[in-house]
Image: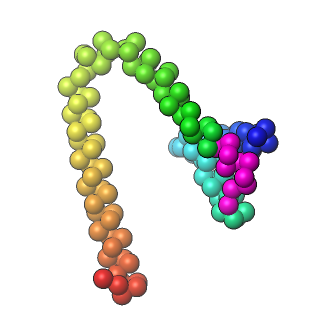
Amino acid sequence: MLWALTALLAFQLAGEALVAWLQLPAPGPVVGMALLFIALIIRGGAPKALAETSRGLLSHLSLMFVPAGVGVTLHLTVLADSGAVIGVALFVSTLAAIAVTGLAMTWAMRLSKRKGGQE
C-alpha cells in the first residue's frame, strides 16, 4: 500500500512539475492522472496493490467535498447577492454543454459510418 500511495503522489508531482515547466493551462493533478493512465496502458493494467489502494481512496472520496461545502456555507451572502447571475451562468453553460455533446456525438457517428460502413 505504501508504494502504491507513493506512486500516486509521484505521478501527481510529475504532473505538477510538467505543468510548471511547460506552463500548461491545466491542473497538475489532472496531467499527473493522464500520465498515470498512459503508464497503466503501457503496463497493461494496474498492479493489484495500486488497484486496492485506489479503491480504498475512492470509497472515502466524499470526505474531500467537506472543505468545499464549508466554503460554500461561509460565503452564502456572496451567493445570495449573485444568485441570479450564477443561475443564468449555470443555465447557459448547461445548454452549451448539451449542444456541444450532441454535435460531437453526431460528428462521431457520421465519422464511424464513413470509416466502417456501419449503420
Q: How many marks?
A: 0
State the image coordinates of residue 2 (x, y, percent, origin top left): 78, 38
Q: Is residue 85 left or right of residue 15?
A: left
Locate residue 81: give its quadrant. Answer: top left
Is the residue 48 above or below the residue 60 in the image?
below
Does the magenta-highlighted stretch encompass residue 87? no
Display coloring: rainbow
> What type of secondary structure mainly makes up the magenta span?
helix
Is the residue 56 above or below the residue 68 in the image?
below
Q: Residue furthest bottom?
A: 117
Q: Is residue 15 visible to the viewer in this orientation of the structure?
A: no
The residue segment tinted magenta is 45-54
State the image coordinates of residue 105 (x, y, percent, origin top left): 32, 65
Q: Is residue 59 left or right of residue 38?
A: left
Is the residue 4 above or below the residue 60 in the image?
below
Q: Is residue 80 visible to the viewer in this orientation of the structure?
A: yes
User: In which quadrant will I find the C terminus?
Assistant: bottom left
Locate residue 76: give its quadrant. Answer: top left
Q: Residue furthest right?
A: 3
User: In which quadrant will I find the N terminus?
Assistant: top right
Image point 36% across, 70% down: which residue? 108
Q: Nearer the viewer, residue 22 or 56?
A: 56
Q: Nearer the viewer, residue 47 or 17?
A: 47
Image point 30% across, 56% down: which residue? 100
Image point 32% across, 57% down: which residue? 101
State the image coordinates of residue 111 (x, y, percent, origin top left): 36, 77
Image point 21% across, 33% down: which residue? 88
